[in-house]
Amino acid sequence: MIRRFPVACLLTSFGCAAIAATMNTPPAARTVEAQDEAFGLRLPDPYRWMEGEGNAEFDGWLRAEGAYGRAQLDAEPRLKFWRERLEAVARAGVINRLQQPMKGRIFFLRASEGREGVLMVRNADGSERTLLDPGAQQGGSGALTAAITGYSASPDGQRVAVNVQRGGSELTTIEVLNVDDASSAPPDTIADVWGEFQAGWLPDGKSFVYTQLAPPAERDATDPMLDMRVRLHALGTSPAADPVVVRRGLNPSVALTPNEFPLLDVSEDSEFALLIIGGARPQARACFTRRAAALRPDAKWSCPVDYDDNVQGLALHHDQLYLTSMKGHPNGQLLRRQLAARGHAGPAQVVIREDESAVMTGLAVASDGLYVRRMRGGPDELLRLDYPGGAPGRVGLPYSGAIYILNADPRAAGVVFTLQGWTQPRTAFRVSAGDTRPGDLHLGADSPADYSGITADEVTAASADGTEVPLTIIHRRDAQRPLREIAMLEGYGGYGISTQPYFDPMALEWVRAGHVFAYAHVRGGGEKGDRWRIAGSGPAKERGVEDFIACAQALTVLGWADRERIVAFGGSMGGVVVGGAITRQPQAFAAAAIQSGILNPARLLAAKNGANQFAEVGDPRTEAGLKSVSAMDPYLRVKAGTAYPAVLLVVGVNDNRVAPWNSGKFGARLLAASTSGKPVWFRLDADMGHFNTAQAALSREQADIYTFAEREAPAPSSSAKE
């Protein structure tokens, strides 16, 4: 029988929380007769009505589901324990977005007291000042969550352009601050900039280029991420008059597709400007022209780097273009090409050959040399070499860990970077010219708790085809196997992104309470180089699902958890892996928590940011692409009469990366199909986008996930009850 909410609950969230809290079961969603038929495939889609922006019926249904889930979580006695425990560690300071000094000034974000990151500046004399506290801009209303997603300091260190988002949407406004007094000028406020795209200052420090969404009148009705363009802004002028420098169809020497993002580098280190073109894929295209001509819409660009070159890192120093290429070398080799004034790029010369045991993952250009980051079995190493291509020397790191931030200024010597481990807090360091070891910048925070009693084991699991899959298991040192606690297993497996050692106090608190937190390094990531990425992308996406299931089985075989106490965890592209695993082998998991997951990739074309995913999963407009995405689609995999595990779907209302209806459709189909009697709850956040970024908000979200996990996979011992 189909249960329906009153009409008022479909049109507005007013009053729905009270109604949902008194219901014994979540509301059922209506179904429609809809399906896709193409290339011999027939794909039924009974919840097609949930799609689309501004869908009042779906919004009302989702809010009612979220209210019901909220009421159920709030009724759980363990929630208070987890909120108190995680809020305590969320107050610790975290350093992020560290930028190489500009004229003696270091800029960085400091998140503390559970708030969003605050933009700070440290002067040459060591004094520190707050430049921008995004939370203070809200006027105390708290209606939306303001956050800094990035920033860029001018070459003279006098100004900083800051990307600020509200409500977690990742669509930001660029605001320009004067560093001396933290003042801002209203004309220099630019809207509709994706949060990852910072301003690129010109050498004069009085103008910058930026990549912006298409204007509303030209914007695609379904996908606003299409047809981005580069514009030029001069300080003190109206952004409405900013000229377009690069966009699709403007210049015949630069061919762009609608789903490509153009980024322009015009730093004064080189007489050339570099145009980097890419999207949700590790490879990039690159074009160059004389810097003096780069700001003209009719500039003559030469494009010597295409996607087929499999270049995943670029750096420009004077007339030398340095490239990290995985073509024929899946662990990467460093190449160098000399650029000439008439648009000619010389042949590629090998600067650093491929290392069979280390993956090249990052470059940073400084005046004293080129700094190269390589991942060796999880932890990183840092190399430095003289120009144009001397023998690389290794920079001694204080401890074994991962470098997540590596920044340099081509006009200054040395680099700044952060280092962290599974149980080692993030610390900021600087290497100056001639240093044999990095110097501690004393920007990091002490550990919020004593995690010396926790350790990480690196093991492997044999996947369905025999491939050995890396598996990290974080546990208490005093844990005795067989352990009867809950194992949280996280997986991602997308875009060649690697899960490296990462200091996460909230995960460590789960372990400190007696449980296990494990990371499945499935194919599709980059832990074993580009070969590992390709082996889990597109038509091969199922290999990542098989890897994840194998890691779950390994946890049982190794004695870290019973099958009845394994909880799958993942988000975004990890939704394909986790959603695929629990629908392919539901009996392998007690429960799953999926954050902002891609759960219906066969319908990418109906979603904003959908076309951007074609390189990773396939283009559903083609026969090969549709067969690829439909085969991996968790929503299409749900079968009636199947006993599925308990599922918590974490959804941000303002998500511009993954449409919330992915979670809605998947959850509705699970509710209708499952015979296990286990819950499918929605955890809805009206002030969240793709992910929570404020530590306080994140701690509340994680408390909900841990509470749900303990409810659905209760551990018999007392260690997790302390």
Image (spheres, grey):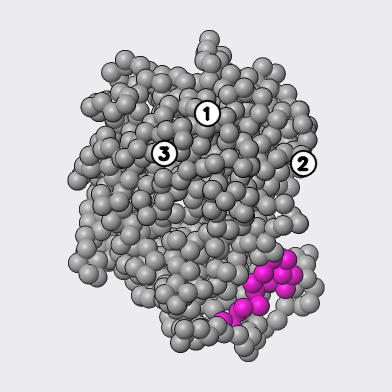
Q: Residue at x 65, y 58 (%)?
A: 224
- For marks 3 and 1, the one nearer the N-term is 1
Q: Please say whether residue 433 is one of the residues in the magenta stretch.
A: no
Magenta region: which residues?
45-59
- The mark closer to the camera, 3 or 1, is 3
Q: Residue at x 66, y 24 (%)?
A: 206
Q: Is residue 335 above or below residue 712?
A: above
Label 2: few (<14), some (14–19) or many (≥20) C-alpha neighbours in 10 Å? few
Is residue 334 shown left or right of residue 26? left
**Element under label 3?**
loop
Is residue 422 in sight in this rendering?
no
The residue tagged 2 is 240
Real-space CA distance between mark 2 and mark 1, rounded to the nearest whole angstrom:
24 Å
Q: Position of residue 594 (x, y in %)?
A: 49, 62
The stretch drawn in magenta includes residue 51: yes
* Side of 557 relative to 21 (left or right): left
Image location of residue 6, percent across then percent down: 77, 78
Cα–Cα span, label 2 and label 3: 36 Å
Q: Amino acid at mark 1?
A: Ser
Disc with the residue nearer the chain's start (2 vs 3): 2
Q: Quadrant of residue 579?
A: bottom left
Residue type beneath disc 3:
His
Among the two numbered marks 2 and 1 on one chain, the one whose residue lies closer to the N terminus: 2
> Toward the viewer: 561 or 283?
283
In the rendered structure, the answer to whether residue 518 lies left or right of residue 233 reads left
* Label 3 sits on residue: 344
Residue 267's disc number: 1
Percent x, y of residue 588 = 34, 71
Q: Quadrant of the N terminus?
A: bottom right
